[in-house]
């Protein structure tokens, strides 16, 4: 068996608004959508720099729903961009909630995170230096030891 691709597929309460948010904030392109006569979006795809994000409205009859407000999330979508500060600022201006302001990280990236208006958590970062896995581990260990963890 060969695996050809992995797609993230998210479900939201208002796919129409989510598509507008994602295209505006991330500058991505909508590839297509499938809409029911009622207006509910059954499937849509967004082009994220060669990667596809799939999304739909909620379908409780199929066991899918949007994240519940105020609850922890089990999945974070990470976007590697040219300027994480600018992307996070656009997201906040468009209604996202800041979870962690952008800052330089031990693993060679500047990154921050936010929760979009539809409940999904996004981590956004850009490279500030190239490190080996061994150097990242060394820095991670030092960070944990200095914090008493």
Image (spheres, rainbow, N blue to C red):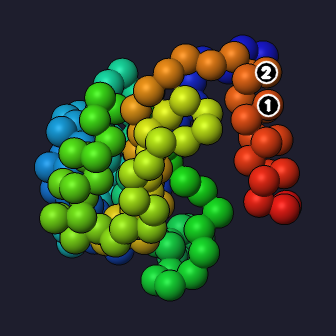
Crowd rating for badge 2 (residues with CA inside 10 Å; few <14, some 14–19, many 20+): few
Q: Is residue 93 left or right of residue 130?
A: left
Residue 23 percent location from the top left of the image: 19, 46
29 versus 91 height, above or below? above
Q: Quadrant of residue 80?
A: top left
The residue that mark 2 highlights is 134
Crowd rating for badge 1 (residues with CA inside 10 Å; few <14, some 14–19, many 20+): few
Q: Point out the residue furthest to the front here.
A: 146
Q: At 28% across and 46% down in the image, what residue appears?
A: 85
Residue 110 percent location from the top left of the image: 44, 39
Q: Is residue 49 left or right of residue 62?
A: left
Q: At 84% across and 62% down in the image, what residue appears?
A: 148
Q: Is residue 50 visible?
A: yes
**Element carrying mark 1:** helix
136 versus 69 height, above or below? above
77 versus 3 height, above or below? below
Q: How far apart in space, not on screen, are marks 2 and 1 (Cα)?
A: 6 Å
Q: 36 or 143: which is nearer to us?
A: 143
Q: Quadrant of residue 100?
A: bottom left
Q: Is residue 58 visible?
A: no
Numbered label attached to residue 147: none
Q: At 79% across and 32% down in the image, what residue appears?
A: 137
Quarter of the figure with the C terminus: bottom right
Residue 27 percent location from the top left of the image: 18, 39
Q: Are marks 2 and 1 in contact (CB under 8 Å)?
A: yes
Numbered label attached to residue 138: 1
């Amino acid at each position: 068996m060969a695996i050809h691709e992995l797609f993230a597929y998210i479900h939201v309460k208002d796919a129409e608004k989510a598509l507008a948010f994602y295209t505006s904030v991330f500058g991505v392109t909508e590839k297509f959508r499938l809409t029911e006569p009622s207006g509910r979006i059954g499937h849509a795809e967004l082009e994220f720099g060669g990667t596809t994000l799939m999304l739909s409205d909620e379908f409780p009859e199929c066991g899918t729903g949007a994240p519940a407000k105020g609850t922890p999330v089990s999945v974070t979508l990470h976007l590697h961009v040219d300027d994480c500060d600018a992307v996070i600022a656009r997201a906040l201006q468009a209604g996202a909630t800041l979870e962690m302001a952008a800052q330089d990280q031990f693993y060679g990236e500047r990154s921050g995170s936010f929760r979009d208006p539809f409940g999904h958590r996004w981590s956004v970062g850009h490279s500030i230096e190239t490190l080996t896995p061994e150097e990242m581990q060394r820095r991670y260990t030092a960070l944990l030891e200095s914090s008493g963890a």
